[in-house]
Image (spheres, grey):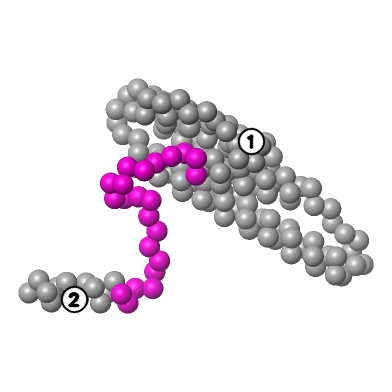
Amino acid sequence: MNQKLFSAIQKRVASSSAPAHAHCDGPCGIYDPASARITAEAVRSMTKKILALVPPDASDAEATARYHNTLSRYVAIKEEQAEETKRELLILWTDYFKPPHLEEYPDLHDIFWKAAKLCSACKVEVSPQHADELLESIEKIHHLFWKTKGREIPWTLAGG
């Protein structure tokens, strides 16, 4: 009976075309806000690059096509990275932080909620202010996270 059930489950899983994503509903214990920082830095970088693009003369079809191609790539990257930042933050918020952390840091939920909202704002807008505020929020989370581990890890930006 168990073998038949196992085989049926295995066939069902094997036939599923939906990709599985995780980090991590298993008890891996590996958490670090660095991944959110890196993706948020990409959001800020793409925001700056979008705003720095200069539209070409409309009569130059080839330059206009290059401009639109570059702009659309920058926008896609900015939005993907903002979504990934939100995902990384939500993992920390919902998987790592526990009730004792909330007792010690009563503003924990507010910090994460605002950071997640900034991720959404960065997707919807091209705002250097919101991109900077997102990184500032992640810096708060970085320091709070490492305090819970009893460690002081300096805040360092990869992109400067």
Residue at 69%, 39% (x, y): give it: 128
Sequence-wise, the earlier of marks 1 and 2 is 2
Image point (48%, 29%), residue name: 153
Q: What is the chief secondary structure element of the magenta stretch?
A: loop
The residue at which mark 1 appears reads as 132
Asked which quadrant contains residue 76, the reply is bottom right
Amino acid under label 2?
Ser
Magenta stretch: includes residue 17: yes
Magenta segment: does it hold 156? no
Label 2 secondary element:
helix
> Residue 121, image x and y in percent?
59, 44
Q: Secondary structure at mark 1?
A: helix
Residue 57 image position (x, y, % from top left): 91, 61
Give the quarter of the figure containing the N terminus: bottom left
Tell which tag, 1 or 2, sits nearer the viewer.
2
**Which residue has dot 2 on it?**
7
**Horizontal relation, residue 96 to residue 36: left or right:** left
Category of crowding for the residue at label 2, using alpha-carbon neighbours closer than 10 angstroms: few (below 14), some (14–19), many (at least 20) = few
The picture places residue 68, in percent across and down from the top left corner, at 76, 63
Depth check, front residue: 49 or 121: 49
Of residue 27 and residue 46, the one placed in the foreground of this image is: 27
**Nearer-the-camera pick, 131 or 39:** 39
Task: Identify which residue is drawn at 85% across, 65% down.
Answer: 63
Residue 6 sits in which quadrant? bottom left
The magenta-colored residue range is 14-35
Mark 1 is surrounded, within 10 Å at the Cα level, by few (under 14), some (14 to 19) or many (20 or more) other residues, namely: some
Q: Are marks 1 and 2 in contact (CB under 8 Å)?
A: no
* Vertical placement of residue 66 versus 30, above or below: below
Q: Nearer the viewer, residue 11 or 114?
A: 11
- Compared to residue 32, the image places residue 15 above or below, namely below
